[in-house]
Image (cartoon, rainbow, N blue to C red):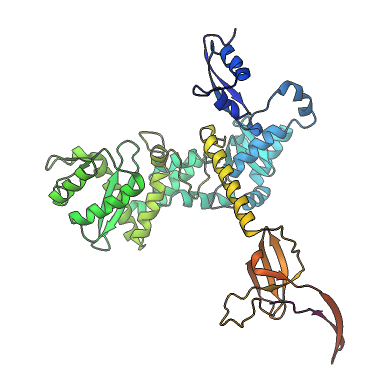
Amino acid sequence: MFLYGKDFVLITDHKPLETIFGPKTKSCARIERWVLRLQSYRYKVKYSPGKDNVADPLSRLCRLATNPSTIYESYVHSVVEHSRPTAVSLQEIEECSKQDSEIQKVKEGLYSESWDEAVKSYKIFQNELCFYGDILLRGSKIVVPSKLRDRVLKAAHEGHPGIVAMKSRLRTKIWWPKCDKDSENLCKACKGCKDLMGQLPSNDYIFVIVDYYSRYKEVKICRTITSSVIIVLLKEIFSRLGNPVSITADNGKQFISAELNEFCKEQNIRIYHTIPYFPQQNGEVERQNRDILKRLKISQAEKKDWKEALREYMIMYNSTPHTVTGKTPSELFFSRQFRDKLPMMRNITYNPRDEDIRDRDRECKEKGKEYADRKRRAQDCDLQVGDKVYIKNMNKSNKLSLNYEPTSHTIVSNNNGDIEIRNDETGNKIRRNVVHLKKVEGQWKALDTESTEDGDVVREHSKLSDKSN
């Protein structure tokens, strides 16, 4: 009675039910009976894997009493793995957090409720703070230790974003007290951001394309700007992003040519031209051109490679929330965020929309593996660390050459068929796949003695029977 007359979702960990209760399924009589009974309800069957769908939880609540922290510890671990800065390793964050007196005082305040005056800026957020090992978190964001904050700020300032853009970039990814103030001071102290004088270092042209909805931007560098060159650049971009519905361009000769208009007609793209001497009609591109010009002048003032500076700017721009949309251009255009050197604050929950695709992909890969193993007569690897092996000869000069090199090698490590071996004569280490190795049969050891000025030295020799081909 609680569901009658309402639209609801029936979540199950039994995937066949999605098809069985689908609108186009022809079920057997036994299942058809259940389908008829449920016809008076408006529902949708949705599959959720067993690991994400705790069925019959009431009968399992008793187990939580022994370890009540398991659930939130798993969540916090997931947050840490997906949000830590890519430019700083997790081990480095842990080590610096242990040595950071500020974070240790926060830890003492959280656990003993005795807050030091030096960390009062943390106390107001105490309900949002927690520790995962030695790493301090505020919600789902890592609190960066003092020693690493300069590196994170410099990574966030790559591409020379403005104060507002840099703050937005940091707020969605990491946190520490007065983070906004530190980023503002860095922008104000940046010499390149203040000095906008200088000429461009070459006679190259920059071709800019902007998506008006997402503000996603593509930049191409070219020496000539004829219609044929523009068409080649457009084809390269459209091959990755698809054809747009329309293009708005200025009245340059390359954009009003019959060649470009014919190309747009072939691709079913409408092309619009702005009013002469009225650049405001294409204001979004003009605004982007101004930002690009600013970065080029900064690179010239700092005596840096302007092309590399332009690439850094594009990485920064497409991964920074736009002031109008509140989302990053990449997120609106590709429905995903770009990864950069800052912590990646993506949604850590599993996306159920692509569950069918993932299941099908997993099944097809497993079938392909079984077929390949059967065709190649694959067997489990019995090689162990310390075993002696011969290496397959990859450079046979003639038909009389040995299939395996006569020099023996010792296995140093074995990682699922990725084997590292050491040459018994030279000591050099190399990597080979298990199919390139042949185990030496009949291994035994003998001890020899060698006289020296300091006395007898025992030397161990491996006596190997040569059974290679």
Which residue is drawn at the image coordinates 71% and 23% (left, top)?
57
In the picture as drawn, the residue positioned furthest to the front comes out as 29
Left or right of 114 on screen, residue 43: left
Please indicate, yes or no, whether residue 257 appears anywhere in the rendered image: no
Q: Quadrant where the N terminus lies? A: top right
Residue depicted at 59% across the width and 9% down the height: 2
Q: Identify whether 4 is placed above or below 274.
A: above
User: Is 305 covered by the magenta stretch?
Assistant: no
Is 45 placed left or right of 468 in the picture?
left
Residue 464 belongs to the span the image colors magenta: yes
Can you tell which quarter of the image residue 134 is in? top right
Residue 244 at what x, y percent from top left?
A: 28, 40
> In x, y percent, where is residue 355?
55, 35
Question: Does residue 135 show up?
Answer: yes
- Foreground residue, 51 or 249? 51
Task: Give the tally of numbered discs.
Answer: 0
Furthest residue to the bottom?
Answer: 453
The secondary structure making up most of the magenta span is loop
Left or right: 45 with respect to 290?
right
Given residues 22 and 339, the one toward you in this image is 22
Q: Quadrant of the C terminus?
A: bottom right
Image location (x, y in percent) of residue 226: 18, 56
- Identify the residue at the far top of this view: 1
Front residue of 98/21: it is: 21
Residue 281 point in image, percent of width and height: 19, 37
Magenta part of the chain = 461-469
Q: Is residue 207 left or right of residue 216?
A: left
